[in-house]
Image (cartoon, rainbow, N blue to C red):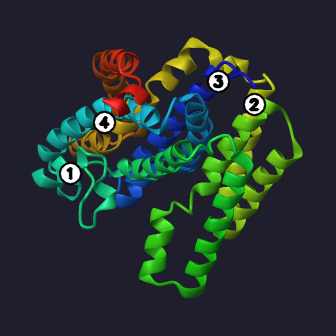
Amino acid sequence: MSQKKRFTEIDALRGLAAIAVILFHYTTYYDGRFGHLKDGYIDWFWFGEYGVQLFFIISGFVIYMSIMRARSASDFAIKRSIRLYPSYMFAVVLTFIIVSMSVMDDLKVGFGEALINMTMLQDFFTGIDRVDGVYWTLRVELTFYVLMGVLLLFGKAKHIMPVTLGWFAASVLIQVIHRTVDTELTSIIREYSIASFSHMFIIGMMFYAIWQHGHRFRYHMVIAMAVIYDIFFQSVENAMFTLLFIALFHMILAGRLKFLSSKVFVFFGTISYPVYLVHQNIGYVMINRMESTGLVHEIYLLIPIGTSILLAYALHRLIEQPSHDALYRLYKERRDAYPEGAMMKR
């Protein structure tokens, strides 16, 4: 079946998830970790922590769409690198500099650790701190990309049902073994296999299949299995939010959330990646500085929120967009001049 046009509503949904995560980090999470100086600080945005699982569901949809359109595993890997690394590397440098100049010693990392962070592989090494705490999700995403690249490499990308069912079975086995044995080894296996998040990506992949092939019982069966998995291996509350996100995807596919295609929501979707990269530790430094000078009311959160959005927009316009266009143009010229078959013969 031919590929259909991408949903702008899904990109907008990613932007809303990023805003929810920011609000959670600046209120509930900051208060729990550092403590706001104002008593009774608002705790309305505790739900924002679940924005991360929405990111993973969206990635399942978008990345599976990408591998269905990729020419090869190397093509997929290069395109992902072009998309992710320029903004990320700039965000690492910016965050490292700002945090290093602050009084928040708990957020600081060494120069050598910052250099390792530039690779985006810091979480695959023990004893390496992150320049920004939110970067933990990148290891999960990278692991998912590797799994998708393997599908491309072995020509199995189109076999979505055996792939997802096999992944489900492996994740269940890992979770059961860990709960039964509960050793450091089983904990490491569970973490690095992303078994705690696999069902989120699978839900996204199933919605891609529904989008392309229509509502089929087997797709909905896998989504239902993912919710049950969530209840057993995460929590009922987690599963409730998963059901909410499933409902949102159903409404998007049914064309009932067209308002998300408005310029405002699409704008936030466009800057969602850079805003995610720069908001947390830089925002914490700003909140700490503001509160130390007496700006303790919740209204002043508009300052770090606005700053994060402006930084993200600048990062998008000055780094992300031009670097992507330039690097992709160079890659496309080389790819077209030296197809993979021809490269192999040289």
Residue 22 lies, with reference to residue 185, above or below; the image says above
Decide which of tag 4 and tag 2 comes sooner along the chain: 4
According to the picture, the residue beneath numbered tag 4 turns out to be: 88
**Element class at badge 1:** helix
Mark 4 vs mark 1, CA separation in Å? 13 Å
- Whether residue 44 is visible here, answered yes or no, is no
Decide which of tag 2 and tag 3 comes sooner along the chain: 3
Identity of the residue drawn at 49% across and 34% down: 72
Q: Position of residue 56 (x, y in %)?
A: 56, 45
According to the picture, the residue beneath numbered tag 1 turns out to be: 116
- Whether residue 219 is visible here, answered yes or no, is yes
Mark 4 vs mark 2, CA separation in Å? 31 Å
Mark 3 vs mark 1, CA separation in Å? 35 Å
Q: Quadrant of residue 22?
A: top left
Decide which of tag 1 and tag 2 comes sooner along the chain: 1
**Element class at badge 2:** helix
Q: Position of residue 289 (x, y in %)?
A: 22, 42
Residue 9 bears which disc, if any? 3
Residue neighbourhood size for the residue with mark 3, other residues' Cα within 10 Å, grouped as few (<14), some (14–19), many (≥20): many
The amino acid beneath tag 1 is Ile
Decide which of tag 4 and tag 1 comes sooner along the chain: 4
Residue neighbourhood size for the residue with mark 1, other residues' Cα within 10 Å, grouped as few (<14), some (14–19), many (≥20): some
Identity of the residue drawn at 29% across and 38% down: 295
The answer to whether mark 4 and mark 1 are in CB contact below 8 A is no
Front of the two marks 3 and 1: 1
